[in-house]
Image (tube, rainbow, N blue to C red):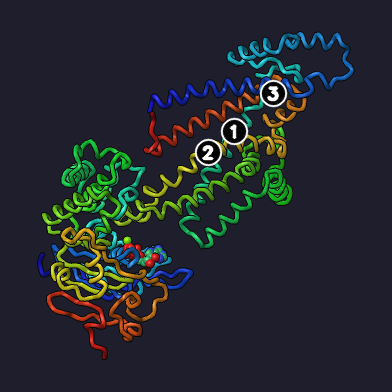
Amino acid sequence: MGKFIIRRFLSLIPTMFVIITFSFFLIRFAPGGPFSGEKNLPEQVIQNMMKKYHMDEPLFTQYIRYFGDVLRWDFGPSFKYKESSVNELIEQCFPVSIMLGSAALVLSVVFGILVGIISALKQNRWQDYLSMSLAVVGISVPLFVIGPVLQLIFAMKLHWLPLTWTSRNTSVTFALLPVITLAFPYFAYIARLSRASILEVLRADYVRTARAKGLSENVVIAKHVLKGALLPVVSYLGPAFAGIITGSLVVESTFAIPGIGRIFVQSALNRDYTLIMAEVIIFSLILVLVNFLVDILYGFLDPRIAYK
Amino acid sequence: MTEEVILRVKGLQTYFHTDEGIVKAVDGVSFDLRRGETLGIVGESGSGKSVTNLSIINMIPSPPGRIAGGEVEFMGTDLLKIPVKDLRAIRGNKISMIFQDPMTSLNPYLRISTQMVETIVLHQDLDKKAAKDKAIDMLKLAGIPAPEKRIDQYPHQFSGGMRQRVMIAMALSCNPEILIADEPTSALDVTIQAQILDIIRGLTAQTGTSVILITHSLGVVAGMCDTICVMYAGRIVERGPTGELFEAPKHPYTQGLIKSVPRLDKASGERLFSIRGQPPNVIDLPDCCPFYPRCDKAMDLCKRKYPASKDLGNGHAVSCWLYTEAK
Ligand SMILES: Nc1ncnc2c1ncn2[C@@H]1O[C@H](COP(=O)(O)OP(=O)(O)O)[C@@H](O)[C@H]1O
Ligand SMILES: [Mg+2]
């Protein structure tokens, strides 16, 4: 097992290498550049700027230089936000996004599994119908609709919760609406996934064996059903986290949250090369690490996975 | 085998309410099981053998299943009437089961030790440590080499035959009065089948445990059972002591089954006998002998009414109009 973890971890290195290389060249080859918007700059000024950002060097030299910087966790200066470095921007915005995303993931997993269990055990009764109707809404209605609808009901009509982020209002109640919005689709999917999977395991031969041994229904569910039934949920955690991170871009703009989502879109439009690269690298790193953790967790849960 | 009846099943009816209609999977099954007896239940697949035995410990999936009538009297109490809490104290303790497919009957996510210990701790006054020792002893009795090491492994680390030994060890770990083995060898290689049957026979004979052995093969029951019940379409059509049933089978279906067992003493060129036709669909079955469409001796009466059981003495009984007088 220890060997497996180390080997699996080492395999992250080439993955990250490919991601960094690929995005570096992809962004450079996209039409336009960081200075193409500023039409009236004199030629000399542009030349100076190119020199400052080392863009006058051959592309491959730039790549090597950039790679070295990244290894030292230095993402360079931003092209647009001239007063701060990319590292500073990331440090300001990223924690907010990470909190939002993690809270949404935890919320969707906990409630998704809980609702999945209830619907499976109350199959074809009102609890099941209610949960699954809610789940259909969650899966089919996009985030940019859910967010405003929640704002309309809970902020504008009922005045229970704040509408958007303000620098004065940093209480937890503010976070409620965006986190719920972000978690909703994943909650819905996890609820359906765990319900279907529990229903399937309930019919398994080994569950019949457990009942024939005289175990009470609670023990049968908790000890014999859930472990196998929740494996699909565990393998869904990776994609769910990826989705939540993407979704947070939408939710942050709906709720005016000063997270990475806002500068992400801006940086792409501005061709702010260094900032885009830093965002891509950090998002990829998080996803790759989450998938790594999920693999390890899966291995712990399913003894049939062979670590060769 | 003693004369004491430990389990008496009387007029058991188990129905499934499906979209196509009511499936009368078990329709009026009665039999007695005596202490120390090994009773074979033989019949084609779909004849209701498994449903009969799941009904005994009241484990029919409901819905769609429902026990519509009958009694299951175990040591004086009707198992179909007692609360589920009392029933659980009997399941796995006084009456335990082994199932057909050892590959899927053990929980793949739990160690063998966990699965065995939970049963023992549940029904016996032992702590975990003592329960594990008991489990190791049982595995040893069931013929598992190095049980103290193997017990901490997971099911996928065992072969099919070994898993069935684990199932046997687990089922017998609480010294049950009755072991119900539902086709314990059907999913295994022929070479292993005999070993598994030997273990069941050996271990239950030592403790005087009664056995209900379900199988679709007469060959399996012949060498092992004291008594045989032949099931067809949810009913027991003939019941009798093994020797008598093989020598003088009365029901045309039993006769057909016996004729279709391959035999070494027959000329090799001879074609194997097989009963013509297909087993009936038990959905909305009318009140007739379900075997008549496949029976060479069918009479008009057979299509109109199911015959009552006729006692031929010596524990031999048959439900067939050839032997029962119409009233
Ligand atoms: N859960 C169920 N739902 C509907 N029908 C069932 C169910 N379980 C068993 N049956 C029906 O009951 C009949 C007897 O099945 P079973 O006892 O398993 O046969 P076998 O003799 O092969 O063990 C079959 O016709 C089967 O289709
Ligand atoms: Mg069966």
Of all chains, the one bearing label 3 is: A
Q: Position of residue A213 (x, y in %)?
A: 28, 54
Query: As rendered, which of A79 and B54 lies closer to the eye?
Result: B54
Q: Nearer the viewer, residue B245 or B286?
A: B245
- Chain letter of disc 1 in the image: A
Q: Secondary structure at mark 1?
A: helix
Q: Residue at x 20, y 47 (%)?
A: B126
Q: Amino acid at mark 1?
A: Met
Residue A82 coordinates in the image, percent (x, y): 76, 17
Q: Amino acid at mark 3?
A: Leu
Which residue position is annotated with label 3?
A26
- The answer to whether residue B34 is visible is yes
Front in this rendered view, residue B322 or A59: B322
Type of residue at label 2? Leu
Residue name at image x 59 percent, y 27 percent:
A284
Which residue bears the numbered disc 1?
A99
Q: Which residue is mark 2?
A: A237
- The span from disc 1 to disc 2 (Cα, nearest Å) is 17 Å
* Marks 1 and 2, the one that precedes in the sequence: 1
